[in-house]
Amino acid sequence: INKMKEISSSVDQYKLTKSIKGQIQQSYVIVLLLIALVIIFLATWFGFHLARGITVPIQELAIATTKVASGDLDIQLKTRSTDEIGTLVKAFNKMTADLRQGRAEVITANQELKNSNLELDRRRDYMEIVLANVTAGVISIDRSGYLTTINKSAETLLQFNADKMLGKDFRDVIPDSYMPQIMALLKELFYSERGMVRQQITIPIGNEKYTLMLHLTTLRDKKNNFLGTVIVFDDLTKLYKAQRMAAWREVARRIAHEIKNPLTPIQLSAQRLRRRYLSRFADDHVFDDCTKMISNQVDELKNLVNEFSNFARMPATKPSENNFNEVMSECLALYKQAHKNITFQLLLDQHLPDTKFDREQIRRVLINLLENAVAAIAGEGTIWLKSAYNQELQIITLKVADSGCGIPSEDKARLFEPYFSTKKTGTGLGLAIVSTIIADHNGYIRVRDNSPRGSIFIIELPATDS
Ligand SMILES: Nc1ncnc2c1ncn2[C@@H]1O[C@H](COP(=O)(O)OP(=O)(O)O)[C@@H](O)[C@H]1O
Ligand SMILES: [Mg+2]
């Protein structure tokens, strides 16, 4: 029975359990679902966490890279991990550090370069200033014959244009008129043992002839390699002119002295002869003619000698407050009446300031120039007298122009030399006196062709009292 009871209770229990089978199944499913949800949630969270650990540093790296690309090298990234990303960030940081150092080195090197360039510029400027301010002309030619230096004095004196000539072969740009002389000197330099040649040459520049003292020197570097040639020259023209003028004055003084003395006795003797014998030889006109001739010629000789001694003993200038316009109109008035065939034109600058000059000497200048102008005009012609004042440069310009025969260019260079004359009875002293007076007044005189015919004498004088 017991067994039976046991079996029946088991059956009951089974029946009961069977009835709640669905409930049990349901609760199991719910539990399983919950576990699955938790697992999914955890997996997602872990996934996100992992992804952030990779993408954030990579994003930071990307931003930092663009910054580096745009020049910001001060960037430093934080290393959060020791994985591959950490290594990448470390490598990146090292790279920027290297770049920073490199850039700093480049900057210092650049600065040093700049400084040394500045120093070089300074030295070059200094050399250029020295070269520009030496009164001697300096020209240098490199080993291939190209012009490397033409200083200011050389430019002015030789009428060169340095900008156009530098860097060119000297054989192409040096004027043909004196090229052979230069070539001969260079040849001499080539064969000279000391690598130096000194010579005086006379060359034509423009319309005038210049006398230059040339020093040619071979340039060599420390290893004695040929680098080129340097030519230094001085203008001796003015010195020569002054020396010549002084010599001529001495000649004039002696001639005047030697000739003047016997002239008066000759003239007196001739006059005495006339007084005593003219009535006796009244029927013979030879005696009358000859004694008259002697007397007249002696007069002319006296005039000549006077001009000589004037030139020889030119008095020192006595400047006083004057106006050039006044002197000009005064001189013109003298000539206007005497020469009816010539038209005189006076063009005066009314703003000409009063300046200090020797009135008598300037009168002499104008009269000499007018005398020549009148002589240059055969028949009808015009003579212009002009004055002008340049306030900026403080220069007064006087011009005497004519429509006469003009002056051939070969004569122009010698015009102002004493005793240069193309006239039969000319002394050639007129323009020599003119140029001496103008030089005594610190001025400058030159001659140009007038157009269409004739010549212009241009005088430039300082408007300030010196
Ligand atoms: N205005 C001029 N026109 C042409 N030739 C001139 C003129 N002025 C000067 N000359 C030339 O210059 C030379 C020198 O002049 P100058 O010294 O006054 O001496 P001179 O008048 O005694 O000849 C003259 O012989 C003449 O040939
Ligand atoms: Mg004259």
Image (spheres, rainbow, N blue to C red):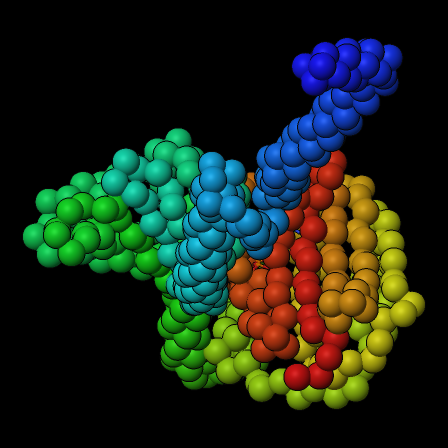
| Between 358 and 155, the one nearer to me in the picture | 155
Left or right? Give the position of 171 relative to 302.
left
What count of labels does the image hold?
0
State the image quarter where residue 25 is shown: top right
Q: Residue at x 34, y 49 (%)?
A: 140
Q: Quadrant of the C terminus?
A: bottom right
Q: Position of residue 38 (x, y in %)?
A: 73, 30
**Any part of residue 29 in sight:** no
Q: Position of residue 300 (x, y in %)?
A: 56, 68
Ligand 1: give its quadrant: bottom right
Above or below: residue 89 compared with residue 442: above
> Residue at the spot x=47%, y=52% of the render?
97
Up the image or down, 212 lies above or below 272; here it is above
84 vs 193, left or right, is right
Lateral position of residue 53 relative to residue 171, left or right: right
Depicted 133 relative to depicted 15: above or below: below
Towards the viewer: 60 or 293:
60
Residue occupying the far front of the picture: 1
**301 and 209: which one is in front?**
209
Residue sitting at x 75%, y 16%: 5
Instruction: Measuring from the top left, give residue 110's x and y in whole percent.
Output: 46, 55
Residue at 84 percent across and 76 percent down: it is: 353
Q: Is residue 204 left or right of residue 345?
A: left
Which residue occupies the foreground of this view, 77 or 407?
77
Residue 280 in picture, x, y percent from top left? 53, 73
Q: Is residue 130 in sight in this rendering? A: yes
- In this view, the residue farthest toward the left is 193
Residue 75 lies, with reference to residue 427, above or below; the image says above
**Image quarter hosting the N terminus:** top right
